[in-house]
Amino acid sequence: MQSNVESAEQSRDHGFAAARQELEKELKEEDKKARSKITKPDKACEPNLWLRQVGWVSHLARLDYKELKELVAPVEEDEPELQILSKAFD
């Protein structure tokens, strides 16, 4: 038979575990959102001063990183029209 103290401890532990899971879930969602946005790089990590001068970060900030990545992906085998255009520009 469980005492009231043991029952309260188990209930509290279960509450902490549920709260921790919820917090981890929210942190993962926020991290996913942050990774999908284009942000201004640290000056020390910036590859080229020219990129800062032309303002690409502010221009692209409203766009989704994943969508942009798909737009510049190599042409697939099942895209014959794009293959022709790609060859024409090469």
Image (cartoon, rainbow, N blue to C red):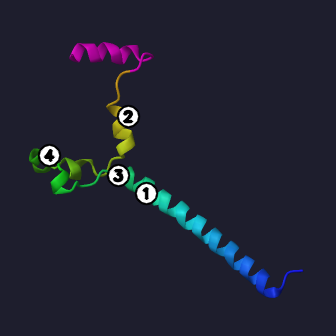
* Circle on res. 31: 1
Label 4: state its secondary structure. helix
Residue type pointed to by label 3: Lys
Label total for image: 4
Which residue bears the numbered disc 4?
51
Q: Earlier in the sequence, mark 3 or mark 2?
A: 3
Instruction: Give the main secondary structure of the magenta stretch.
Output: helix
Q: Earlier in the sequence, mark 3 or mark 4?
A: 3
- Above or below for 17 versus 35: below
Identify the residue at image location x=55%, y=60%.
25
Distance Cα–Cα, label 2 vs label 1: 20 Å
Q: Residue furthest bottom?
A: 4
Local packing at callout 4 (Cα closer than 10 Å; few below 14, some 14-19, many 20+) is few
Q: Earlier in the sequence, mark 1 or mark 3?
A: 1
Where residue 13 sits, quadrant-wise, is bottom right
Q: Position of residue 49 (x, y in %)?
A: 10, 48
Local packing at callout 2 (Cα closer than 10 Å; few below 14, some 14-19, many 20+) is few
Range drawn in magenta = 76-90
Which residue bears the numbered disc 2?
70
Q: Earlier in the sequence, mark 4 or mark 2?
A: 4
Label 3: state its secondary structure. loop
